[in-house]
Amino acid sequence: MGTLVGILPGLGPAATISLLLPMIFHTSAVSSIIMLAGICYGAQYGGSTTSILLNIPGEASSVITCLDGHQMAKQGRAGPALGMAAFGSFIAGTLGIVGLMLFAPTLAKFALRFGPPEFFSLALMSLTLVTYVSKGSLIQSLVMACVGLVMSTVGMDPITSRARFTFGLTSLLDGFELVYVAMGFFGLSEVLSNLGHAFKQEILDSKIRNLLPTRQDWKDSAKPIARGTVLGFLLGILPGFGQAITTFVSYAVEKRFSKHPEQFGTGRIEGVAGPEAANNAASSGTFIPLLSLGIPVNPSTAILIGALLILGLQPGPLLISSRPDLFWGVVASMYIGNVMLVMLNLPLIGLWVQMLKVPYSLLYVLIVLLCQIGAYSVNNNVTDVLLINIFGLAGYLMKRYEFEGAPLILGLVLGPMLESSLRRALMMSDGSPMIFIARPLSAAFLIVAVFFLISPLFTRGRIGKAAIESKDD
Amino acid sequence: MWFFHVKPLDIMRELKSGLFFFSLSLLVLWESLRVELGTLMEPGSGFLPFCVGLVLFALSLVLIHRGWGIREFQKPHSRRVILALASLFVYSLLLEPLGFVVATFFLVGVLFHLGQPRRWWLLIGMSAVVTFLAYLVFGVLLHVYFPRGFLGI
């Protein structure tokens, strides 16, 4: 499923995870999270296939692969490009899981020392970083984060049990369920936005041979894969950076390290190996804050946090120690998943390309229907279908007015943690806001948050904005 | 200034969105005050929403200021999207009285037509197949209890 999502342009991992959320009510917690996590990293494998063969990135994280990957395909070297993308992804993905295995429990143990001020500052920093690296205007991203935070406060106040923003509607007492918001904002709105554009599908019918890269290809790609892995993993841990931006950074790094930077964009295998390794390593990296701190770093992991909550699990530093079966189950599944992805992806490339021949006019109907049935099946309630359509409309308008969905969904997920830790910290300090600055770790998080908020004033640009806008051009 | 750097086409929509979020911020502030702000020593239910409402208020003013005075055309909404959205809202209202099978059959037919106009018999055939498969997978295999509607199906 992850590979398929990666291959199909116009259907991202966040949208797919949101579409599959209703299914987790029918399976065990470990199986559900394994399934949803598989979509996150599987999509990174699939995205490169269409970038190389069709010059159409299936995912934002595969945009950069188009530059050299498609040029290689044009030169008759589609096989080695696909092969190196898959092997590079496998190596980086596997090393990323080793990193996840080593760092997540350590970070979780360390996070046990966190008190309310640290959690407040951490949540605020995460939210700020996500808005900083979002596409488009920073103001608009901040607005979306605020809307997400306000949405998170709808319903009963967990401390005083007082109803807020319900306007007398009992259906709002439980607040906005993430499953509907995510399905509407990411699933339905994505399809509706695509519906507004003309459907164009150009499929390459040429046979792909020699998937195994040559010795020279390996020699050229070894260092880019290593650098991409380290870079992707480290950036993946940081909120907001996710997979897409790491690929742009990796490409820039490879170009700088190359003896022939002028040949980048003409079919250099380093331009495929580095970014493809980076996006897979980042995919593993995103699971560290998710599983050890309960902090989502992108929309996909935000929805995964929602899934954990739906399953009755409490994301945070105690998750790994209280549910080791879940953590190690996810880690083991990622190892197996990575092996399976390489074994399935390369021999089945022909099939994946054929999948692209399914007309979007057919595919979109199935996705919309899946959204409607998925929303209904959660509580067997017709009102939920109406609710998801309202969120779909809001998501569509949001996209049309160029407001990013990521800050909103992160605001919605981080809101409860942010609010409870803010109120507890202020109660702890007898109302002194200095508690957030007096504690070194909390102060450090706040400094980072403030830095990213004010840095565009001086730099007149942001990493994420520049990187993602170049994809649109 | 960095926050004034926007593409000209976005300006008109920014004014509209700025006004929308301005109204939303007022609503948030009003509701926060209603549910009690509390004090710094004991923050109440409205404390965080009030702080967020203030930030939203300020940001919406920036959006309004940025979009003020400039009038640009923007692309009209796609007819397909409007019709698809309308059919989805009609579907959510008719799902109960018509039942899953009948309502879904019509919805799928409309959506297929919006995606790509086809011959009527093909539309009916495709809608019937998709509705049947959806019912088989979700209704029969996954035991989702769909509304039966006035026809009892």
Image (cartoon, rainbow, N blue to C red):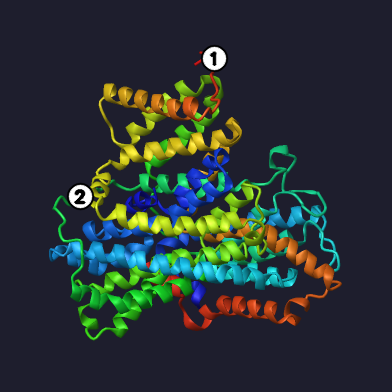
Residue in the picture at 30% in, 62% down: A86
Query: Label 1 lies in what chain?
Result: B
Determine the residue located farthest toward the top in the rendered image.
B151
Q: Is residue A267 above or below residue A149?
A: below
Task: Determine whether, in the image, residue A265 is placed left or right of residue A418.
Answer: left
Task: Determine whether, in the image, residue B114 is placed left or right of residue A459.
Answer: left
Amino acid identity at mark 1: Phe
Q: Position of residue A291 (x, y in %)?
A: 58, 62
Give the crowd class for mark 1: few <14, some 14-19, many >=20 residues within 10 Å.
Answer: few
Label 2 sits on residue: A203
Query: Label 2 lies in what chain?
Result: A
Residue in the picture at 63% in, 68% down: A108
Residue in the picture at 43% in, 52% down: A39
* Along the line of sight, the residue nearer the viewer: A224 or B95: A224
Q: Marks 1 and 2, Cα distance to the nearest angstrom?
A: 46 Å
Give the crowd class for mark 2: few <14, some 14-19, many >=20 residues within 10 Å.
Answer: few
Amino acid identity at mark 2: Ile
Residue in the picture at 41% in, 44% down: A192
* Along the line of sight, the residue nearer the viewer: B37 or A41: A41
Q: Is residue B29 visible?
A: yes
| SS of the residue under disc 1 | loop
- To the question of a shared chain for discs 1 and 2, the answer is no
Q: Is residue A368 above or below residue A352?
A: above
Label 1 sits on residue: B150
